[in-house]
């Protein structure tokens, strides 16, 4: 499918100035593509505490869940862990989003894919039925922990998404970018994004982080882990605990403990978004596919980057 | 693919019926797909939530951490969602 970027109109508000067609290079037949690394991984070195916590590499064995907690997007007992060292890798790259829109205020999550580009779910920047259209303004706080904001907060009114999301809210393309006016982290430190083949993805251990409404009121960072349970051409499924407010958070893997994390999905949906035919009680994310890698690359290369 | 969601109006209150300003509202369980975004109530506890037809468990959390939940059957009409927070 040919996808294209659609940007929020900028002043004057009714003028369509931002629509940028995606590069027309055809997608590779095999879905294997990782956004090129910039520099070495030194800036993204994990602390010993983070190495002990994060899941790294692959496993043939599922992580056995404890007994049921009763909440559906929290699968079995809630295994999320609050992260307080939010000034460290990779936690500092994850942002609490406070979204102001025509029809109210919302809470979501985003993550840095470039020095001044934060990736999130499409529905965090544009939702015709929930938000009344484009967000007016988003305040993002990288590494927020309650009132502690180790890297300050940033406000943006410039957003982009994909035509398939803007025009028909296709959940498989629920992806967006928030453009900032200044660099926040060096290119060598931010998340990479990767479109990996099915066979490569299947046994990977996956980390999912975000700022849920509960616990934490959208001000505390939570993290959980497990294996990728299933992959479809445009969606990945995992039994990792999440809840409202974590939309847009990164679902990421570590090939090894010395590599930078690779985001392979953008968390967006709870169990209700999983087809009944799959007979799995799992949450899901639009999968990073080659077209999305290309699009994110274009956003990173856009004005101001 | 069509977006079947309908915007429903609701209010978060305490056990005495007073609106709880700035409470966060989110779906924790449902028979249909909903994005995992949280909606912030206005100062009087009012909110709007877009849902497709289906059965949902909707939860609210006050800034002080009080939690309340309700079961809601979303049809194709705008229906009121009432959530009362536990003390």
Image: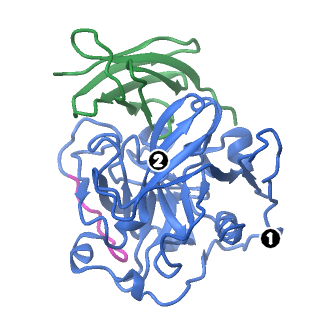
Chain colours: A blue, B green
Task: Determine whether, in the image, residue A250 is placed left or right of residue A80.
Answer: right
Quadrant containing the N terminus of chain A is: bottom right
User: Which residue is located at x 26 percent, y 73 percent?
Assistant: A50
The part of the image, by quadrant, that contains residue B46 is: top left
Q: Secondary structure at mark 1?
A: loop
| Front tag of 1 and 2 | 2
Q: Main secondary structure of the magenta part?
A: loop
Horizontal and vertical percent for residue A106? 47, 37
Residue for badge 2:
A247
List the residue tagged with mark 1: A26
Find residue A241 and report its horizontal and vertical position in percent.
32, 50
Chain letter of the residue carrying label 1: A
Magenta highlight range: A55-65
Asked if labels 1 and 2 share a chain, the reply is: yes
Note whether residue B37 is visible.
Answer: no
Q: Is residue A58 magenta?
A: yes
How crowded is the residue under tag 1: few (<14 C-alpha within 10 Å), some, or many (20+)? few
Above or below A24: residue A139: above
> Which image quarter: residue A252?
bottom left
Is A276 positioned to the left or the right of B86 in the image? Answer: right
Q: Position of residue A9 (x, y in %)?
A: 75, 46
Q: Residue at x 49, y 52 (%)?
A: A248
Numbered mark located on residue A158 in the image: none
Judging from the image, mark 2 belongs to the subunit labelled A
Identify the element where label 2 is drawn.
loop
Q: Is B51 positioned to the left or the right of A21 in the image?
A: left
């Amino acid at each position: 499918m040919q996808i294209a970027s659609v940007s929020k109109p900028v002043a004057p508000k009714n003028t369509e100035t931002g629509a940028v067609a995606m590069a027309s290079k055809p997608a590779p037949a095999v879905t294997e593509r990782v956004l090129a690394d910039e520099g070495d991984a030194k800036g993204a070195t994990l602390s010993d505490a983070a190495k002990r916590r994060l899941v790294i590499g692959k496993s043939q064995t599922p992580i056995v869940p404890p007994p049921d907690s009763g909440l559906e997007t929290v699968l079995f007992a809630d295994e999320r862990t609050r992260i307080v060292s939010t000034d460290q890798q990779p936690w500092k790259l994850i942002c609490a989003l406070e979204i102001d829109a025509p029809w109210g205020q919302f809470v979501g999550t985003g993550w840095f894919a470039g020095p001044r580009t934060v990736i999130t779910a499409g529905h965090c920047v544009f939702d015709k039925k929930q938000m009344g259209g484009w967000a007016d303004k988003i305040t993002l706080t990288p590494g927020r922990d309650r009132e502690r904001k180790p890297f300050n907060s940033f406000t943006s009114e410039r957003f982009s998404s994909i035509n398939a999301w803007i025009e028909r809210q296709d959940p498989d393309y629920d992806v967006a970018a928030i453009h900032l006016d200044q660099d926040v982290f060096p290119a060598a430190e931010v998340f990479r994004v990767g479109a990996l083949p099915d066979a490569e993805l299947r046994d990977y251990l996956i980390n999912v982080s975000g700022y849920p409404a509960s616990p934490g009121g959208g001000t505390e960072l939570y993290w959980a882990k497990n294996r990728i349970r299933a992959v479809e051409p445009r969606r990945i499924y995992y039994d990792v605990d999440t809840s409202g407010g974590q939309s847009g958070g990164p679902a990421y893997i570590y090939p090894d403990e010395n590599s930078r994390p690779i985001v392979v999905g953008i968390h967006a949906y709870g169990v209700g978004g999983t087809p009944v035919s799959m007979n799995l009680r799992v949450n899901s994310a639009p999968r990073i596919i080659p077209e999305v890698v290309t699009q994110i690359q274009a956003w990173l290369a856009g004005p101001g980057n | 693919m069509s977006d079947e969601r309908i915007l429903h109006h609701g209010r978060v209150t305490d056990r005495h019926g007073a609106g709880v300003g700035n409470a966060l509202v989110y779906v924790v369980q449902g028979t249909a797909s909903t994005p995992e975004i949280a909606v912030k109530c206005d100062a009087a506890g009012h909110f709007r939530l877009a849902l497709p037809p289906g059965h949902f468990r909707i939860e609210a959390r006050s800034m002080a951490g009080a939690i309340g939940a309700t079961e809601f059957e979303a049809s194709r009409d705008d229906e009121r969602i009432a959530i009362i927070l536990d003390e």
